[in-house]
Image (spheres, rainbow, N blue to C red):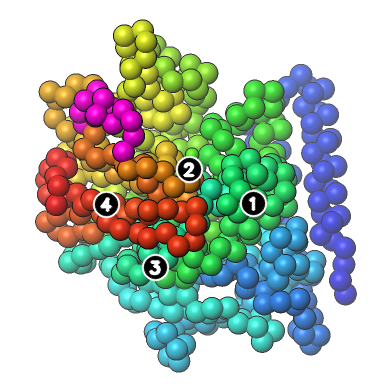
Amino acid sequence: GCADSFPSFFAFMLFQKNNFLKAASHENGISRRLFLGYAAALYSIPTIGQTANIKHRMKFASNPFSLGVASGDSNSTSTVLWTRLAPEPLDPNGGMPNLAVPVKWRVSTDDNMKNIVASGQQLATPQLGHSVHVTVGQLKPDNWYWYQFSVNGEESVVGRTRTMPKKFASPEQMSFAFASCQSLEQGYFTAYDSMAQDELDLVFHLGDYIYEYTAGNQGTIRKHHGKEIESLSDYRVRHAQYKMDPLLQKMHARCPWFVTWDDHELDNNCADDISEQKNVKPVDFLIRRAAAYQAYYENMPLRRTSIPSGPSMQLYRKGSFGQLAEFTVLDGRQYRSNQPNNDVRSPINEAALNPGSTMLGREQRNWLKQSLIQSRGTWNIIAQQVMMGMVGTSNNKNSMNYSMDQWPGYTHERMDLLRFMEDRKISNPVVLTGDIHSNWANELRTDDRKMETPTVAAEFVGTSIASGGDGQDRIKNQDKLISDNPFIKFHNRQRGYVKCTLTQKTWTTDYMVADKVTTPDGKITKRTSLVLENGSSTIQQA
Ligand code: FE
Ligand code: CA
């Protein structure tokens, strides 16, 4: 039978939340640790649900695979296959009944799905938005595979994925793209159409996969559904709306992705339990965060280790492509302390230099350093959110202002990291960045204001897929920007994506830009190609 456990589950959670908030105010506030414990129990996701009776073949209003398929977080023997059943994607329940539904999956070595090497069945439960995350193991290293889902005779498209080479393998070449910031109200995802024609081993998504704002807040190219998202079903519907984009689906089906969030997957410029809006209590913001994180997990090809526990979710992780490259994927939002100087562009003053401020949190910072020391990779990729280059703009007080939401707001931790990479002679650190809807290539120093000191790492900042609209090649004050910040080797403000090709000897970065994204017929061309030689962080023109 079709029990009503789903609505009553949420009624129960709401009841618990109100009780908890009452208790919290009665206790005159409550410790953060205690709250996280409460919230984790409150939002714990039950995994047992009613299962659909397969004898009564469920009739869907339309193909339930409307959000496409994806894979991600591959290592040398396994990968994660993802889909989510949503015959009516903009419905809060995706048009699905309150039942767990068994979904079949199979993996093949050919694109006709003839030579099946793995198959199985997994329950898509209403508790996890009818998402499916299959961890397929015992695969061959350095191999391409195809996969497909089916339910009640309905089939998904066939996706393609791959495993990474073995840890000690020495692959000749690796190619990947990175992307960020895809406000669908501001443009079309033309970049993904071009990316899908590249032969790529993987994709990094560096955040702002969705935007949280109310419909029409950002533009009218395409319109967000509903008001600013706050509840679990709000976040689910917003993710579904983005996932409906055919070009995004096309690229997800091409190769494995390694995703991380920035701020807009939750709330603009958020930091840990602090909302952008000044009047929001941390307790309330953590409840919103639990909803945002759960919807994020449900909609991404992430491993089970990333299943959220209330407002906490393990997103930072690492991977490798044999000994050619190792990569860390960072979470710069969940553990960060509040932006200094009220998050207003400021000089690097005492607040920005505060040794207690952190973007990564102590645990993640230690893990990152440990990972870099242990790495066997020729190239050490740090895939993360915000710009590390200390880009200053002159203010009228004869000094420079810096973004407090980016790494300059956390200068102490930033310099500590760069100094660490220099002291420990980390092999070819390369930072990948999104967030600011523009292309940059920066040579990083421990202190970028001291050009006489040695470069330690290279940073490639990739522009947005769509956020910001068509953009422009050069800005008005471009020459002044570069002369004020001579470590910048390239800057451009068009939309697009970045493609990187690595060999043992060289790293090549291709900046792919769109002439326009405000109409669907934009053209992508290579704007410039930059090169690093193994052993040097000097950025050269190809
Ligand atoms: Fe953005
Ligand atoms: Ca951002």
Q: In what element is the residue under mark 2? A: loop
Q: Position of residue 16 (x, y in %)?
A: 82, 41
User: Which residue type carries mark 2?
Assistant: Gly
Residue 526 located left or right of residue 235: left
Q: Tell me the distance, in whole angstroms, between the alpha carbons under discs 1 and 2.
A: 15 Å
Q: Residues under labels 2 and 3: Cα distance?
A: 22 Å
- For disc 1, the neighbor class at 10 Å (few under 14, some 14 to 19, many from 20) is some
For discs 4 and 3, the disc positioned in front in the rendered view: 4
Q: Which residue is mark 4?
A: 527
Q: Is residue 361 above or below residue 8?
A: above
Query: Which residue has dot 3 on it?
Result: 196
Name the residue that disc number 1 marks.
Answer: 223
Mark 4 and mark 1: span between their CA atoms?
Answer: 30 Å
**Disc 4 + disc 3, Cβ < 8 Å:** no
Q: Given the image, on which type of amino acid does mark 3 rest?
A: Ala
Q: Quick one: label 2 or label 3, which is nearer the N terminus?
A: 3
Residues shaded magenta? 474-487
Give the SS element for disc 1: loop
| Structural distance between the alpha carbons of marks 4 and 3 | 18 Å
Outermost residue to the bottom = 114
Which residue lies under the disc numbered 2?
Answer: 468
N-terminal-most mark, 4 or 2: 2
Label located before the other in sequence (1 or 3)? 3
Foreground mark, 2 or 3, reads 2
Q: Residue at x 37, y 42 (%)?
A: 472
- Of residues 234 and 3, the one nearer the viewer is 234
Work out whether residue 278 can be spotted.
yes
Task: Using a 10 Å C-alpha cutoff, classify the residue at mark 3 as few (fewer than 14 neighbours), some (14 to 19) or many (20 or more).
Answer: some
